[in-house]
Image (cartoon, rainbow, N blue to C red):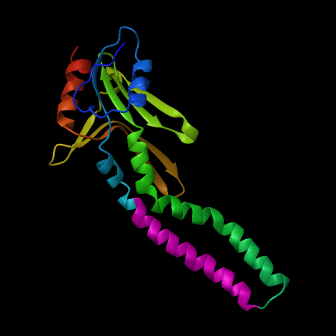
Amino acid sequence: MALSRTRGDANLPSDVADRVESELAHDELLVWIGQPIVARYARSAIGLVIFGVFWSAMVCVVFGGFFFAGLFRGVGPFADLVGLVTSCFAIPFVLAGILLLTSPFWMRRMARNTCYAVTNRRAIIWEPGWFGRKQVRSYTAAGLGSMMRLERKDGTGDLIFEQLTTNNSEGPSTTSRGFKAISQVRDVENLIRNTLMNK
């Protein structure tokens, strides 16, 4: 079945289009297809970059202090051992800082490999996973009852289908899932409601 091109997907990469086509059932009709606005999607990483600056500075101060404290105690086995242990222990913290500081890059990459679609049966999200895997989530009318729209002045925004809250050592953390950083978000919401929820 060939994909019918609809608004929002003029620049859809061929591999993404093929991925969508392979997911649809033979009698499933594509109503809308699109991707996140790359710049808008990556802009959400600003907070991660700011945190990454403070994180990296803290790592440099703490582990740098331990490292140089060992050196100032004198040369010999003790100084070598402190330097080795400090270096090994600091590696995951340094990697975390690099990941935070480079978050705009991998967020842009994620946006280019993310795809959204609305069919006559469901709303579908394709997102990249770890190690080249693809995550596909489908939402039927039953799962869209709490859909929420976050709209900006320029008409772009997010359609949130679900929010998942998990508890960790730093307190509760909420993850939102839906069509993020799309253009004409109100029109897409109305399209979903008219196609899937008003039957």
Residue sitting at the far left: 153
Q: Is residue 9 above or below residue 55?
A: above
Q: Is residue 187 left or right of residue 168?
A: left
Q: Which residues are magenta?
A: 48-73
* Residue drawn at (59%, 78%) of the image: 62
Helix, strand or loop: magenta stretch: helix
Q: Is residue 163 above or below residue 198?
A: below
* Residue drawn at (46%, 65%) of the image: 52
* Residue drawn at (68%, 80%) of the image: 67
Q: Is residue 107 above or below residue 178?
A: below
Q: Nearer the viewer, residue 107 or 50?
A: 107
**In this view of the protein, can residue 135 be seen by the observer?**
yes
Residue sitting at the far top: 27
Q: Nearer the viewer, residue 103 or 51?
A: 103
Q: Position of residue 114 (x, y in %)?
A: 40, 37
Q: Nearer the viewer, residue 108 or 145?
A: 108
**In this view of the protein, can residue 176 be seen by the observer?**
no
